[in-house]
Image (cartoon, grey):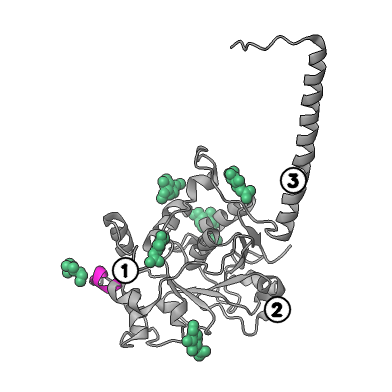
Amino acid sequence: MAMVLPKLKPRHHHYVILLLSCTIILCLYFENTWMLLTDNYHVSKRAACVNRTCAPDRERTDWFCARYAPTVQLLLNSSNSALSAPLSSWWRGLQVVKHVANYTALVRNLFPLFPDQKPCSDSHPNHCRTCAVVGNSGNLLGSRYGPLIDSKDCVMRINKGPTGGFEEDVGLKTTHRIFYPESAMDLDNSTHLVFSPFKILDIEWLISVFTTKHITKTYTDVPSTININRDKVMILHPEFMKYVHVNWTENHGRYPSTGFLTVIFALHICDEVHVFGFGATKDGKWHHYFDQTLTPYANESHAGDFEYKTIIRLHREKKLLMYKGWT
Ligand SMILES: *[C@@H]1O[C@H](CO)[C@@H](O)[C@H](O)[C@H]1NC(C)=O
Ligand SMILES: *[C@@H]1O[C@H](CO)[C@@H](O)[C@H](O)[C@H]1NC(C)=O
Ligand SMILES: *[C@@H]1O[C@H](CO)[C@@H](O)[C@H](O)[C@H]1NC(C)=O
Ligand SMILES: *[C@@H]1O[C@H](CO)[C@@H](O)[C@H](O)[C@H]1NC(C)=O
Ligand SMILES: *[C@@H]1O[C@H](CO)[C@@H](O)[C@H](O)[C@H]1NC(C)=O
Ligand SMILES: *[C@@H]1O[C@H](CO)[C@@H](O)[C@H](O)[C@H]1NC(C)=O
């Protein structure tokens, strides 16, 4: 393509060159200042925030972007509770003991009980929300991660993982605890429950706990009542559970473990995710930090091995920070 340039007299060239040079110098100067400003901004406000934005116009070919679905439904609420037929059949397929119940009628009773939740109501555009996800692995013993864990804005704990007696290694703050009826425990008033319904009876149990208290047994004994702040109850959406199973564990195991669900949940609601207490101990043993019973976790229904490798991969891709418990 030929562009017709105005024919310039030789001395005009000098002006043009001078003007161009000035523009370039000015641009460089301002770009530097801009970079310094934005760098400062990053240091002071969004220190080490992980950028998980997947450009919509970029081909989603890289490993992370092919899996990460930013618009997935995370939590059940009064307006998104309808399940598509394939989702409903996947989710109902998780229950081992068949239990017939009308889901639509059930969720109608659910949301008058619990106010709709935003996953992270205290998020702030100028602040990098840091989260610690604390698994229950024996590799936490002797780690002295407690203060590091407690320094995060949110500390998410899993099932019955205790803090009492283990504060040095696991910390004492709990802002979120994820469990299902069979792994339930009392929470203090400031802790969010992230309830993980693996079956329809789990939703009935949650309603029962706050109303009739009549459910005392699922496939095992469950508490009929429990201390939970009703204003802080969040319920994972079955769509999210299926998304984690399909996209992140790639259909390994029957369904994702509560711990792995929490890691991916944190990826979606936190700016910076720090993962503690996952995987085996230094000598290759799988047990909880609070008991010495070896668990066949690595190769059980949860594909712990695959989940662990996925977390390591997320660490390598700099989407989260993984702490192994030893150096
Ligand atoms: C994050 O990455 C996306 C895509 O690469 C980019 O468009 C966006 O500006 C980045 N955001 C920040 C805060 O750096
Ligand atoms: C329910 O959640 C979706 C996103 O998952 C959100 O767009 C919608 O506003 C929520 N509805 C209520 C009533 O909170
Ligand atoms: C389930 O409950 C809803 C709402 O009460 C009702 O409209 C629907 O017909 C029920 N479905 C079945 C299969 O009973
Ligand atoms: C727990 O917090 C709620 C508000 O979220 C409040 O109404 C209730 O009184 C508190 N309960 C206790 C035992 O502090
Ligand atoms: C991840 O989920 C999205 C939307 O749910 C889907 O389009 C995509 O194919 C999934 N990726 C993988 C690797 O399963
Ligand atoms: C789990 O199974 C895989 C493949 O069958 C095997 O390579 C791995 O060593 C097993 N892990 C454990 C901890 O038994």
Mark 3 and mark 1 residues within 8 Å of each other at the beta carbon: no
Quadrant in which residue 153 is drawn: bottom right
Label for residue 168? 2
Q: Mark 1, mark 2: which one is toward the viewer?
A: 2
Image position of 226 (left or right of 129): left
Residue at 33% across, 86% down:
211
Q: CA distance from mark 3 to mark 1?
A: 57 Å
Label for residue 96? 1
> Residue 279 versus residue 204: which sits nearer the camera?
204
Image position of 150 (left or right of 29): left
Say what secondary structure mark 1 lies in. Answer: loop
Q: Quadrant of the N terminus?
A: top right
Badge 2 local density, few (<14 within 10 Å), some, or many (20+)?
A: some
The span picked out in magenta is 102-107
Position of 160 relative to 258 (above/below): below
Which amino acid does the dot numbered 1 rest on?
Val
Residue 119 placed where, x, y %?
49, 67
Which amino acid does the dot numbered 2 rest on?
Glu
> Residue 318 versus residue 119: which sits nearer the camera?
119
Image position of 227 (left or right of 317): left
